[in-house]
Amino acid sequence: MKITAEQEKSIITDILTKMDVSPEHAEIVAEVTLDADLKGFTSHGIGRFPQYVKGLKSGTIKPRGDFEIESETDSTAIINGNHLFGHYVAYKGMELAIEKAKETGIGLVGIHDSNHFGVAGYYSDMAIMSDMIGLVFANTEPAVAPIGGKIPILGTNPIAIGVPSNKHYVSVDMATSASARGKLLEAVRRGEQIPENVALDAEGNPTIDPEEALKGSILPFGAHKGYALAFMIEILAGPLVKAAFGTGVKGTANPEEMCTKGDLLIVINPSQLGDVEVFKDQVDEFIAEVKATPNVFIPGDMEVRNVKKHMEEGIEIDDKLCQQFKDIAKELDMDIKDIFSD
């Protein structure tokens, strides 16, 4: 079945509100979750939502409260997320980074003791909308074995970069592994296989079975290059921001464990280096050169296409996910037949 963007936001906010989540927090979670589905990052969209419900039930996600700024300078800050929704903490953290970049040219905000924050590109988009460059790094529970090893130590460690432009949406949002862990979880739920050259089982053998892959490890993208990026992000989003690292990172996949991941948000203000309009014009000139050959894509083009498609055609919900929502609604004594009909 398919649901509309409005229906997705409505069901998420209604369930969270019913679970005593702060309305502001619920609204941000719904916005970020919908953003993932519209862009085509279904592994971080509504399919991930039942995980958040489990986190609320187990107490690893706090429904109300606020974060704490532990230390701060004109350009930097370290935030303790106090185990609130990662979406809310990252949103507020990016707002703070943007404000600092307006004043000093750069804003750098580190976050620890937060939670899974959905799709990283939502937060780099926030910088774009302020005519700034946004960079987002995060570490996750171990899922990737170092090159030559078979025991997961590194996370899928995403990176997102967004750049302002006058004519284009310029954004990259990707895991440093061959697949995001969420795509494996999604494949398990849908009863699908995963592509070859994505993961190894617990014995270090190639597998296309997502359940075996989750017991084993995901390969880094680009072999040693993806591994090197994941390694560096583990440090930037771990020790640098007072978060856990390596096998100490927990709670991004298992919602019953307190989350120990970290986030690093960086905002660069081009107007502090020159005329921002000239910068954006030059970005567009570069893109025009790249697109001079027909059918050439830039980072962000597929997301633009996906948003248009999903706004027009709706967002696909598989049968198992639909049933999960019905079970959640039944437990909360909610009527959701207008969205998830029998």
Image: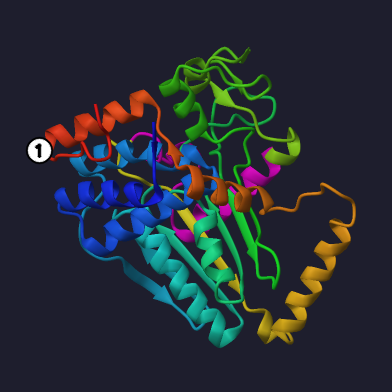
Q: Is residue 290 left or right of residue 340?
A: right
Closer to us: 22 or 249: 22
In which quadrant will I find the N terminus?
top left
**Residue that numbered label 1 is attached to:** 333
- Neighbourhood count class around disc 1 (C-alpha, 10 Å): few under 14, some 14–19, many 20 upward: few
**Camera-nearest residue between 310 and 67:** 310
Considering the image in quadrants, where does the C terminus appear?
top left
In the figure, is residue 102 to the left or right of 9? right
Where's residue 130, x and y in %?
55, 76
- Whether residue 281 is situated above or below residue 79 in the rendered picture: below
Q: Nearer the viewer, residue 192 or 116?
A: 192
Report helix, strand or loop for mark 1: loop
Residue 104 lies, in percent from the top left, at 58, 85
Is residue 117 something one can see in this rendering? Answer: no
Which region is colored magenta? 227-254
Residue furthest to the front in view is 312
